[in-house]
Image (spheres, rainbow, N blue to C red):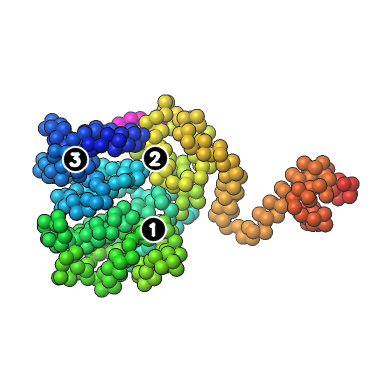
Amino acid sequence: MKPVWVVDDDRSIRWVFEKALGREGIAFRSFGSAQDALAALDTEAPQVLVSDIRMPGTSGLELLQAVKARHPNLPVIIMTAYSDLESAVAAFQGGAFEYLPKPFDVDQAVELIRRALDESLREEAGEEAPATTPEILGQAPSMQEVFRAIGRLSQSNATVLITGESGSGKELVARALHRHSPRSAKPFVAINAAAMPKDLLESELFGHERGAFTGAQQMRRGRFEQAEGGTLFLDEIGDMPFDLQTRLLRVLSDGHFYRVGGHQPLKANVRVIAATHQDLEARVREGLFREDLYHRLNVIRLRLPPLAERREDVPLLARHFLAKSARELGMEAKRLSDDAMGFLAGYEWPGNVRQLENVCHWLTVMAPGQLVELADLPPELRQESARSPETDWSAALAREVERALVRGEAGLMDSMTRTFERILISKALAHTGGRRIEAAQLLGIGRNTITRKIAELGIEGPHAAVAASGSD
């Protein structure tokens, strides 16, 4: 795989990309000017180009035009400040892959570059995007429910709302819904409502006519038109500006829309799949999201569980991501020791599947040997776990509840509460040498209560006997 080129006259921006891409194991090359990048383009080409839009001398737009003339399928990501929105729109006209506003979130930038890399590699392989999208992995009962839902929706054109935490794989589910639908031969088009300011998002969704605003030198088709006959995935729909929600509702209601600056209604034949990590009901109550749009989107809701709720999938996912990273980097896949795998399976994963994938990529690049030991895991991962020892027993309890539910057990509240109380009282009695009143005080319960619980729970042993005899 060829390197990612970063073009920016700001040394600090180049430094941020160099550190982020190096950490992710993505090959890169930096340029301080568009002229330098154009000179290098005479003898080589990047896999993806990331360029600022305003630079001394040759601008990012001119660089975009020159690159597209030589390499039409090369993904180009344009960086610009919010004050350059008109230029950003012009960049899309020139064929830019995506727009990255400054200041940007580093993780968002890396994720965008990864998407562009995937697109570039698909173009080189001459394959359609859906064919190369990996299937979703998961053996946990909660994921099996997701798979069953995808199967039940396979012949449906119904609008779907996918909910789940950031990084849990909502776009993968949306792609699977498209791939297994009657629209699979048509485009799957995705747009992140949280990644763009309102003015640009409106133009991206609905397109614009020539002369609609300064810099709009020619007509541009929006994502609704690009997805004609296929599926439009609206990610982070909860962050869509309120007035754009009104325009979206109109499209979903009557199937028609207007380009920005246009007067001719256009028919939209697309299936809409929306996703959010936010509580849309709460946003409706707060007046931040239209209630009628919420009900229009919430035809079928599909909840994607966080990785912490399907820990049994961690080994499967980890092996998959290690093999994937090894293929991308041309290396032999690394293996996890039992201790390392056990640590990963017990970790909370606040960043969900995306965080696990990033960790596996880090290990592929940074772990010294083929067998990854516990000490080889990222230091921040081990430090965070050390700061939160309470997660060990709560995670174990969560796994036990999941196993009991899978076994079909009933009455879990009563049985597990009894087990919890038995352990608490037994340990408290052991700690006090069987002194019932002292144990009750430590537990925050009364003397009569602890006596009754000892009898009810059948607590046996020398400490219980001492307590029962009243020898406090």
Left or right of 398 on screen, residue 328: left
The 10 Å Cα crowd at callout 1, few under 14, some 14 to 19, many 20 or more, is many
Residue 276: image tag = 1
Q: Is residue 274 above or below residue 68?
A: below
Task: State yes or no: discs 1 and 3 in contact (Cβ < 8 Å).
Answer: no
Instruction: Estimate the spatial distance between the alpha carbons at disc 1 and disc 3, rounded to whole Å.
Output: 36 Å
Q: Residue 465 placed where, x, y %?
A: 85, 47
Q: Is residue 56 above or below residue 406?
A: above
Identify the image quadrant of residue 47: top left
Question: Which quarter shows the N terminus?
Answer: top left
- Element on which disc 2 rests: helix
Q: Is residue 223 visible?
A: no
Left or right of 32 on screen, residue 407: right
What kind of residue is marked 1? Answer: Thr
What kind of residue is marked 2? Answer: Asn
Query: Where does the magenta region start and end?
Result: 329-334
Q: Residue 341 placed where, x, y %?
A: 49, 37
The rendered magenta stretch, by its main secondary structure, is classed as: loop
